[in-house]
Image (tube, helix red, strand yellow):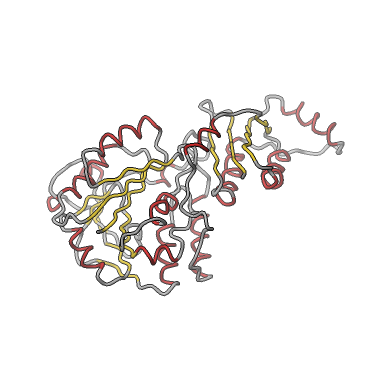
Amino acid sequence: MLSIIYPYRERDLERIRFSLNSLFKQTNKDFLVYFVDYGSPIDHARQVKDLLEDYTFVKYFYCFTEYQPWNKSKALNSVVKLLDTDYFFVADIDMIFHPCFIKITKKLSETREVWYFKVGFLSETESIKEKEFSEYKVKFESNKEATGLTLCPTKQAQTINGFDEIYHFWGSEDTDFHVRLVNAGYKLNYYDKGLVMLHKWHKTYRNKEVNHLTLSLQVKGIVQFNQLHLKQAVDNKVTKVNNSNWGEVISEIDFKELQSKSQIQVINNLSTEVNYFVFQQLANLKSGVHHFQFKKNKNTAQLKKQLKQVLKFKQQSQKIYSLKEINDLVLLHIVNFYHYYSYTYQIEDNLKSINLSIKVN
């Protein structure tokens, strides 16, 4: 049996229906879908779960990561680590599958090698139509550079600890996975004998990125950061990544504990306070749950004066961080060094403060 893994978060329900309907029409039914909802808001998650009840070949899993940034690698690893089928396929909620897709992948799996596929991309107007696979008009086709949809022997993926969980938000985790499989001595193949998948249009992460703080979690320059991390994997011939906790996500118990905030430490937007927290205090937290709030002080001049009096240093210019700068510094530090911890990271609706809760074992 082929396992198909969908990593997902709060996308429109029609995309789910289009994609799963194309699987429902498969000529070969020997597959099972693992649908990993990586932190959709609870109300939306209920709608997803209700929709999926119409598809008997789907298993739904909810991750309590609503207040963590998107991490496709961890969503996939939560299934890959425990998977016992010989092969799995990394799907995408935007994909529409050819009726013979499962039949073709079954044949390819006999090689015991890794495969990825050429994809046909649809225009925005064509993407809203539901019709037979052969009737869609393809706007353009992908090439070997597009690595997101992979058919892989499970044991090979488990040998290299799955996908690298350093990659957050968007970009490079799929290529990194391929690079490390090849570095480990496994063969990688590109299937381009015909189109077996179509990709519905959507706005990309890069087009959503802005230079100011938003309710939607972002880190400026994260795409370029991920590309540099990929370069390290290539240059250093990396194979195995992550630690022994790979594939583990925050539990419901920890999530609820982190939401019960008490004894919140307020950190003002002076650079000295923020830098001390990031580079010293965070690394030396004692066991337990800790809550922090970053906020802009209304009276910056008075704050500087108080800080001078307390620390007894000579008057000097103090940099004032914007909340966007604080967000980019703190969140980038969290996703690189603390993503294995149970934590929540929330930007207040009024965009005037940022809340971080973290559990240290």
Q: How many marks?
A: 0
Q: Is residue 327 left or right of residue 149?
A: right
Residue 199: x and y, percent?
26, 51
Q: Is residue 206 left or right of residue 242?
A: left
The C terminus, quarter of image: top right
Q: Nearer the viewer, residue 361 or 142?
A: 361
Location of residue 108 (image quadrant): bottom left
Residue 348 versus residue 130 in the image, above or below: above
Residue 84 versus residue 308 in the image, above or below: below
The residue lying furthest to the bottom in this view is 185
Location of residue 107 (image quadrant): bottom left
Q: Nearer the viewer, residue 175 or 38?
A: 38
Residue 95 versus residue 43 in the image, above or below: below
State the residue at coordinates (70%, 46%): 284
Residue 226: x and y, percent?
50, 55
Residue 219: x and y, percent?
52, 44
State the residue at coordinates (83%, 33%): 308
The N terminus, quarter of image: bottom left
State the residue at coordinates (57%, 43%): 331
State the residue at coordinates (23%, 53%): 198
Residue 68: x and y, percent?
49, 41
Q: Is residue 30 left or right of residue 217?
A: left
